[in-house]
Every structure is written in structure tokens, then in C-alpha cells.
Image (cartoon, grey):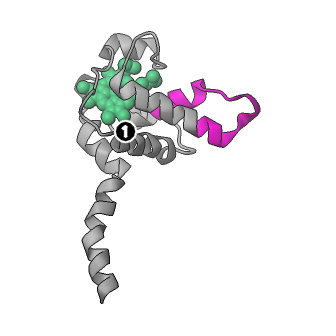
Amino acid sequence: MKNTILTLLFMPILLLASPDGYEVYKKNCSNCHVESISKNEFVKNISKMKAPPMIEVANQIKTHIVIKGDDEDVHRKVVILFIKNYIENPNLEYSLCNPPAIERFGVMPSQKGKLLEAEKEAVAEWIYDRYEGLKFK
Ligand code: HEC
């Protein structure tokens, strides 16, 4: 009984401490980055698009960042760090986006101050894992 009460008491705190990456994406990123779409559909609907789809963002960053020796854990870590940094410090110089996409959409506006550290971590991990093995085509 005591344990149940304690669990109930602390559950909201635990939930708050580890935000859900997909929820963070829906709230903060989905307005500009559609989650998943084929290249064909994307091109057809380009006039409604504000940014590259998240599947393409994930593909671009994962293929551009190469770790010597192909260590997967290090690769995941570095990609996540890149994404977390990009949320607050988008920059033409460091964008790994295709030049035509940047020309079309411009550089991403900084989302500084909108996400907690844990939310940035959660959404970056979600982006890495969500599109594992999936290609924008
Ligand atoms: C107001 C629109 C907008 C919002 C909101 C937005 N982005 Fe972006 N984002 C863009 C645009 C436009 C680009 C492409 C140009 C560039 O690379 O800066 C981009 C690019 C990126 C890139 C770099 C892609 C690359 O290949 O280098 C990442 C990473 C990214 N966004 C992540 C996010 C995440 C995560 C969120 C939510 C926390 C988010 N964005 C919210 C517009 C947005």
C-alpha cells in the first residue's frame, strides 16, 4: 500500500523528468518539418512546405557525419549532439541540408529558449531512432 502511494506520488515527477521525443517533435518541430513523406508527395505539396521533412533531415545528418571505424554508439552520440546544437544555433555555415533546400526554405529560425535540455535530448534521440533504416525516396 505504502509503495503504491509512493509510486503514484512520484510517477508524475518521473514522467516530467523524461519527456517523450515524439511529443516534443509534435509540439515544436512538426509545424515546419513533416514527419514522413515520399519525395513525390513532398514535391507535389512543396508550396505548403516550410522545411525539409524530418526523415530527410535525419538521413542528411546521419550520412554526412561519418565516424572513423564506424562505431555506431559514437555516431549516434555525435548526430544527437549536432541536432541538439542546431535547434538553438541554426547556421548556414553548419547546415548539412541540401543547398537547393536552403535556397527554398531559408535557414531555420533558432528555437532558443523553447525547449528544456531534456526535451532537446529526447527529440534528438527520437529523430535518430525513428528513421533507422528508412530512406527519403
Ligand atoms: C519555423 C520552421 C522550423 C521549425 C519550427 C523547426 N525547424 Fe528545423 N529547419 C527549418 C528549416 C527551414 C531548415 C532547413 C535549413 C537549415 O538547414 O537551416 C531546418 C533544418 C533543420 C536541421 C538541419 C538539417 C541539416 O541537414 O543540417 C535540423 C537538425 C532541424 N531543422 C531540427 C529541428 C528540430 C529538432 C525542430 C524542433 C525542435 C525544428 N527543427 C523546428 C525550419 C524549422
- Location of the N terminus by quadrant is bottom left
Q: Is residue 23 above or below residue 80?
A: below
Residue 37 location (% of width, % of height): 38, 39
Residue 33 location (% of width, % of height): 32, 33
Q: Residues within 10 Å of mark 1 (few under 14, many from 20)?
A: many
* Apparent side of residue 119 relative to residue 129 in the rendered image (left or right): left
Instruction: Determine which quarter of the picture holds residue 42.
Output: top left
Q: Is residue 45 visible?
A: no
Q: Nearer the viewer, residue 48 or 82?
A: 82
> Number of labelled discs?
1
**Label 1: element kind:** helix
Amino acid type assigned to the residue bearing label 1 in the image: Lys
Instruction: Determine which quarter of the picture holds residue 123.
Output: top left
* Disc 1 C-beta below 8 A from ligand 1: yes
Residue 30 location (% of width, % of height): 28, 38
Q: Is residue 4 above or below residue 119?
A: below
Q: Is residue 27 above or below residue 9?
A: above
* Rendered residue at 33%/52% (across/down): 19
Residue range of the region highlighted in magenta in the rendering: 56-76
Residue 109 location (% of width, % of height): 27, 20
Q: Is residue 60 magenta?
A: yes
Q: Nearer the viewer, residue 98 or 67?
A: 67
* Rendered residue at 29%/22% (across/down): 110
Residue under numbered circle 1: 120
